[in-house]
Amino acid sequence: MPDPVRITFLGGLGEIGRNCAAFEQDGRILLLDCGLMFPDAEMLGIDLVLPDFTWLRENASRIEGCIVTHGHEDHVGGLSFLLRDLKFPIYGSALTLGLARSRIEEAGLLGRTELITVVDGERRRIGSFDCEFIAVTHSVPHGFATAFHTPQGVILHSGDFKLDLTPVDDRITDLARIGRIADEHGIRLLLSDSTNAEEPGHTPSERSVGHVLRNLFRDNEGKRIIAACFASHIHRIQQIAEAALATDRTVATLGRSMAKNVGLARQMGLLHIPDNRLVDIERLDDLDPAKVLVLSTGSQGEPMSALALMAAGENKWLKIGEGDVVILSSHAIPGNEHSVNKVIDGLCRLGADVVHSGLAAVHVTGHAMQGELKTLLSIARPEFFVPVHGEFRHLSHHARLAMEMGVPQRNVLLAEDGDVIEIGDGGIEFCDNVPAGYLYVDGIVGDVGHGVLRDRRVLAEEGVVVVVVTVDSQSGQLLTRPEFITRGWVHGPEAEGLIEEGRDRVQEEVEKAVADGAGTDFDTLKRHVRGAAGQFVSERTRRRPMIVPVVMEA
Ligand SMILES: [Zn+2]
Ligand SMILES: [Zn+2]
């Protein structure tokens, strides 16, 4: 009897982002994606969120490598952190590796990996794993679904995908190959993208955006046009550029990642803009505004991005004014709506005409909707099904779709981050749990921890009161009156009387504690200081700032 195959989910099942799964066979581990997640507004000061890598570090010697399905940050952005601790090769399409490479390079970790290019339809052994890379269409070119040919049958992971029958590069999701695998071997287990599992119908083709863009450019001849989209959305960039070229405009890029990705994609032959129609942003002022298109980053309202700076009137290269047209060829990722709204508002205030996906069909999603998810289910006809990539609501919706498509309920597993599932001769089951909490990154330091975040929240919402008492190191007697230092607690003038009262209250408390024999036990003194100050602050202000007692000996 063949050994069971295990899959450990380290991220992406319960949230949009930080996708990471580990396939385990013959004692070896092959990772599928290692992504990051962008923080929400509650995560104060956090730059990004990673999967918990504890389990991977503990099993470092068993890791064979990592497959990257496509170049989005939520699939490759964690590699530059994981590679600090581990060494392993990375497999992906040339573009995916090109996009993944820059963060790894910036972190100085290229020496810890080998980037190995695989192509559409390739079947390759990676250690004891037998993997096949199947073309899928998505909002970044050259994405893959991955078929693992295992002793327990074929496990198909869809990656992020949509079914676009007329994609810009004519590279459609290879349903024919998936159908052949289903016919020849049967698909034992399907893991599929749930991001749009709540959306009925089919996604429009990426080409439909091209029509809308061309019309927009024609309608706005004579005006300067600025268009923002994801810098990795090469097909969108191609269509925006084509609309510009067709209306006799020259293209300039704005923002570091836009310049870098346009360069990379042109070099790889995936993006076609003639040399003489591309101009450096530094030369923008030399050009007729009516004959230029500026391709900008910042479509998610990221605070320091080119577009956000434009909206604030602070962009070094470009000042927005009356008569400018700004196209946001994008849709706000959940959590970014507020930032995007602020940017749109700022641009309008400066006099620009802003076109966004709420006004015109200038964006389509890259993730399959219900009709497409069902199509994949009907072609793959999997024995078992596990929805992946999405918040719990998306996963549970997708599970329901699978049942509608005939997968028996007992064969559908709703797994979450940290779950380990095992597929063996008898079927599929949960078999273990590993740590899979959020790993917060602030600056370059990982593991900010929940305690730190809780403190930041208290500081942000309630402020801080530091109480300093100076006592004699021999007797514990107070040497001076207690000091109150506060930030974000009460407004200055009002605070003075309160603070005097508070000092008295803490003084009384310390004197009493010393008289009761607390003496030189400074931990006990500290507790008394915190207790008295906390009670006072709460009684008089009904607020709960962070109280920091400091006992100094002299
Ligand atoms: Zn993606
Ligand atoms: Zn994704």
Image: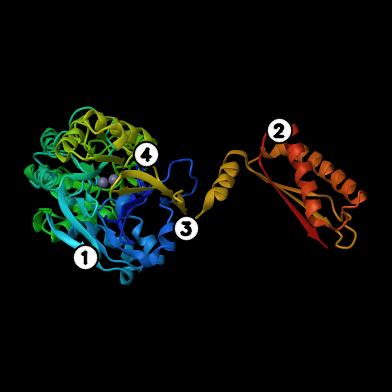
* Dot 3 beta carbon under 8 Å from ligand 2: no
- Left or right of 176 on screen, residue 236: right
Q: Position of residue 414 (x, y in %)?
A: 35, 38
Ligand 2's quadrant: top left
Q: Outermost residue, front direction?
A: 1
Q: Which mark is residue 494?
A: none
Q: Nearer the viewer, mark 3 or mark 2?
A: 3
Say which amino acid is labelled 3.
Gly
Per the model, the C-alpha gap separating discs 2 and 4 is 34 Å
Q: Compute the Cα span from label 3 to label 1.
A: 28 Å
Per the image, label 2 sits on a secondary structure element best described as helix
Q: Where residue 107 sits: x, y (%)?
A: 36, 65
From this view, report whether residue 382 is shown above or below residue 448. Answer: above
Figure check: 285 above or below 381: below
- The residue indicated by pointer 2 is 541
Quick check: can you spot residue 459? yes
Return the residue at label 1. Answer: 116
Disc with the residue nearer the chain's start (3 vs 2): 3
Whether label 4 lies within 8 Å of ligand 2 gets the answer: no
Q: Earlier in the sequence, mark 4 or mark 1?
A: 1
Mark 4 lies on residue: 336
Hey, what amino acid is under mark 1? Ile
**Quadrant, the C terminus:** bottom right
Question: Please, what is the three-letter code of the amino acid marked with disc 2?
Answer: Thr
The answer to which of marks 2 and 4 sits earlier in the sequence is: 4
Disc sitting over residue 446 in the figure:
3
- Residues at badges 2 and 1 in contact (C-beta under 8 Å)? no
